[in-house]
């Protein structure tokens, strides 16, 4: 585990060329640098459970999609995502995806992702956001943590992206 030198305390749990898994407060982030992969989904799931169980009041999970265009996940990766979403345990307070893009295509992607979410799975329904500020408001509410701010979350994402 590597702790960043940023003024915000970010723990970088795992870093590859494709993804970074980081934690901040009671939020775990899976920050993609490229195409989503089975390995990234499975590793983040394996890291989340034991970490989240230690978080008083539960934890939330945030997926950060890369700013550059990537293709849709392959079938194996979609299946891994389905497994990860269907067995969250009682410690998962919320799950969200940040898609920082503008315009019609980005809005369409967010809408499509909401419709593709399986119905009747355990745990909270995933949320989809356009900005770190929107994610910060969501995280502050689900974690009941007023110290989650848009500025700090934006810094956490920056640190994880630079990993």
Image (tube, rainbow, N blue to C red):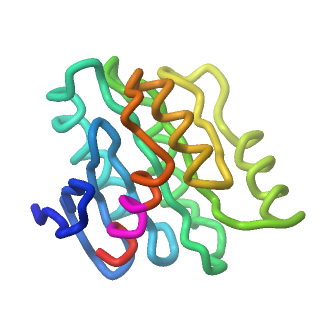
Dominant secondary structure, magenta: helix
The answer to whether 68 is drawn above or below residue 45 in the figure is below
Q: Is residue 158 magenta?
A: yes
Q: Residue at x 31, y 52 (%)?
A: 44
**What range of the chain is rendered magenta?**
155-159
Q: Residue at x 41, y 21 (%)?
A: 144
Query: Front-most of 78 and 109?
Result: 109
Q: Quadrant of the C terminus?
A: bottom left
Q: Residue furthest left?
A: 1
The answer to whether 99 is drawn above or below residue 118 in the figure is below
Query: Front-most of 142 and 123?
Result: 142
Left/right of residue 6 with respect to residue 117 in the rendered view:
left
The answer to whether 89 is drawn above or below residue 20 in the figure is above
Q: Residue at x 34, y 67 (%)?
A: 160
Left/right of residue 120 with respect to residue 115 in the rendered view:
left
Q: Which quadrant would residue 70 be assigned to in this image?
A: bottom right
Query: Front-most of 149 and 80?
Result: 149
Q: Residue 46: x, y in percent?
A: 24, 46
């Amino acid at each position: 585990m590597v702790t960043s030198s940023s003024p915000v305390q970010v723990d970088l749990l795992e870093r590859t060329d494709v993804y970074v898994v980081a934690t901040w407060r009671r939020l775990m982030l899976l920050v993609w640098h490229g195409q989503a992969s089975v390995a990234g989904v499975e590793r983040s799931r394996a890291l989340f459970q034991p970490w989240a169980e230690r978080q008083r009041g539960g934890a939330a999970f945030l997926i950060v999609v890369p700013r550059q265009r990537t293709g849709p996940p392959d079938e194996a990766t979609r299946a891994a995502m389905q497994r990860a979403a269907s067995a969250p345990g009682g410690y998962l307070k919320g799950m969200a995806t940040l898609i920082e893009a503008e315009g019609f295509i980005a809005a369409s992607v967010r809408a499509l992702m909401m419709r593709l979410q399986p119905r009747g799975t355990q745990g909270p329904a995933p949320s989809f956001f356009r900005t770190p500020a929107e994610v910060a408001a969501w995280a502050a509410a689900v974690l009941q943590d007023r110290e989650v701010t848009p500025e700090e979350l934006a810094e956490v994402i920056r640190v994880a992206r630079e990993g």
